[in-house]
Image (cartoon, rainbow, N blue to C red):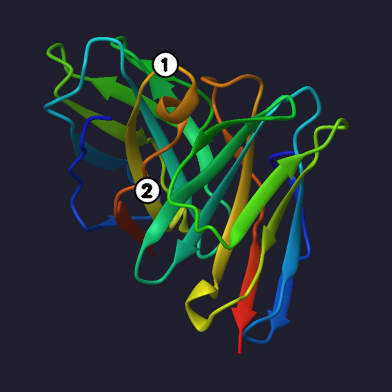
Amino acid sequence: DAKTTQPPSMDCAEGRAANLPCNHSTISGNEYVYWYRQIHSQGPQYIIHGLKNNETNEMASLIITEDRKSSTLILPHATLRDTAVYYCIVRSPYTGTASKLTFGTGTRLQVTL
Amino acid sequence: DSGVTQTPKHLITATGQRVTLRCSPRSGDLSVYWYQQSLDQGLQFLIQYYNGEERAKGNILERFSAQQFPDLHSELNLSSLELGDSALYFCASSVAGADTQYFGPGTRLTVL
């Protein structure tokens, strides 16, 4: 799986948009970009994923650059409950060992009043 | 709520003992994954089962084993426990092998 690079921490004011960047310059053409978050010691929570088009769901938007070497997760109106560690993961679409998720150190997002 | 359940939530045991962690996947999911999260290693993939068969192995110790039963629930067995095995153990499930994985709430294992 391609390696990802994320800033170790970010702050965001409540009600503002949180933009979390991820660099994945060695991504292959068929690899997806997944985002998960982990609130305290809870199980990782799936947020969104995409291949090359921008994606949006009820939780967030995912913007992938045209060259696919980086992406940004956008939480449009961050709340205190969005405080968590956010993981950007590049994942192969194939099965077997390739289907595992490889977690890095993620970005610790702190949402403040 | 992801739909994945894990029991027990907490487990405290002594070195040298054996424990079993249980995971029930989301309804309809055939794949089960186990991950370990320790303070110094982060979240690491241990093993995957698909419809009862082992599909992939990660950094799983020989003292650890897993299985998936006909009703698709899975158990992770940890034996000859050491202090360093203290960690959070998460189970995830997906429809098939390459689909989105959904995680359970985890089991916190403390080895004293």
Q: Disc 1 marks which residue? A: A93
Residue A83 vertical position relative to residue B84 in the rendered view, above or below:
above
Discs 2, 1 touching: Cβ within 8 Å: no
* Gap in angstroms between the C-alphas marked 2 and 1: 21 Å
A41 or A63: nearer the viewer: A41
Position of the C terminus of chain B by quadrant: bottom right
List x then y, in percent, for residue A24: 18, 31
* Residue drawn at x 25%, y 31% as measured from the top left: A72
Q: Chain of mark 1?
A: A
* Residue furthest front in the image: B62
Residue B64 falls in which quadrant of the image? bottom right
Amino acid at dot 2: Tyr
Residue A11 vertical position relative to residue A76 in the rendered view, above or below:
below
Q: In the rendered picture of this protein, how many numbered marks are placed on residues?
A: 2
Residue B50 falls in which quadrant of the image? top right
Q: Chain of mark 2?
A: A
Residue A48 vertical position relative to residue A44 in the rendered view, above or below:
above
List x then y, in percent, for residue B54: 62, 32
Work out whether disc 2 and disc 1 sit on a shared chain.
yes
Q: Is residue B80 visible?
A: yes
Residue A22 vertical position relative to residue A85 in the rendered view, above or below:
above
List x then y, in percent, for residue B39: 40, 71
Instruction: Answer with left or right where residue B16 lies relative to residue B84.
Output: right
Amino acid at dot 1: Pro
Q: Mark 2 or 1, which is nearer the eye?
A: 1
List x then y, in percent, for residue B69: 82, 37
Q: Disc 2 marks which residue? A: A86
Picture disc at residue A85: none
Q: Is residue B9 visible?
A: no
Position of the N terminus of chain B by quadrant: top right
* Residue drawn at x 42%, y 24% as measured from the top left: A49
